[in-house]
Each structure stands twice: as structure tokens, then as C-alpha cells.
């Protein structure tokens, strides 16, 4: 049986999992990624950036600053 890393390397690069995140989930993930930036694995950096972009696109600058502070 292979490790999770080996299995992940064999996944197709196109969308493997479709999931519709709720606004609450996106907010939780955004704060989690912001608070743990140094620990985000390279393989999740694009995902973390998309989550943060979704937050910024849904808020004013003032709201985003308050959200992340």
C-alpha cells in the first residue's frame, strides 16, 4: 500500500474533487491559512491564495483589514 504522498502524485492534474465551500468555510480557511502561513505545504499554496482572493473579492478593503486583524 502506498503513502498518501505517493497516491497524491499519481492524481490527475485536472480537477479531482469538486466541492462547493460555504462562506463560513471560506472564512475559516482564510483565517487558518493567514495564521499558519509558515506551515502551508507547497502543494496547498495555490489553494490558500484562491481562498484569500475570494475573501478580498467579497469585501471592501476596510472589511478585509478588520477580518484579518
Image (spheres, rainbow, N blue to C red):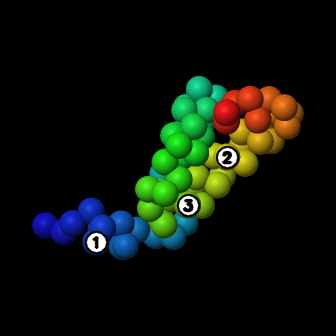
Q: Position of residue 23 (x, y in %)?
A: 64, 29
Residue 1 visible to the viewer: yes
Looking at the image, the residue that sits furthest to the front is 69
Label 2, on which residue? Answer: 52
Q: Is residue 33 left or right of residue 7?
A: right
Which quarter shows the C terminus?
A: top right
Please tell me in which quadrant of the rendered image residue 64 appears. Answer: top right
Compared across the picture, whether 3 is left or right of 43 comes to: left
Give the quadrant of residue 28: top right
Nearer the observer, 54 or 7: 54
Which element carries disc 1, helix, strand or loop?
Answer: helix
Precedes in sequence: disc 3 or disc 2: 3
Does residue 69 lie above or below 51 as drawn? Answer: above
For disc 1, the marked residue is: 6
Lower position in the chain sequence, tag 2 or tag 1: 1
Quarter of the picture containing the N terminus is bottom left
Residue at disc 2, secondary structure: helix
* Mark 1 neighbour density, 10 Å: few (under 14) some (14–19) many (20 or more): few
Return the residue nearer the eye: 10 or 38. 38
- Residue displayed at 21% across by 66% down: 3
Which type of secondary structure does the marked residue at label 3 adopt?
Answer: helix
Dot 3 surroundings within 10 Å: few (below 14), some, or many (20 or more)? few
Which percent across, then down, holds residue 25? 55, 31
Residue placed under numbered mark 3 in the picture: 45
Determine the CA span between mark 3 and mark 2. Answer: 11 Å
Q: Is residue 17 above or below residue 27?
A: below
Amino acid at each position: 500500500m502506498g503513502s498518501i504522498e505517493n497516491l497524491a502524485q499519481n492524481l490527475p492534474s485536472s480537477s479531482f474533487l469538486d466541492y462547493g465551500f460555504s462562506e463560513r468555510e471560506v472564512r475559516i480557511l482564510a483565517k487558518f491559512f493567514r495564521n499558519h502561513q509558515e506551515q502551508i505545504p507547497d502543494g496547498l499554496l495555490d489553494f490558500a491564495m484562491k481562498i484569500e482572493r475570494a475573501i478580498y473579492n467579497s469585501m471592501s478593503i476596510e472589511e478585509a483589514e478588520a477580518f484579518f486583524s
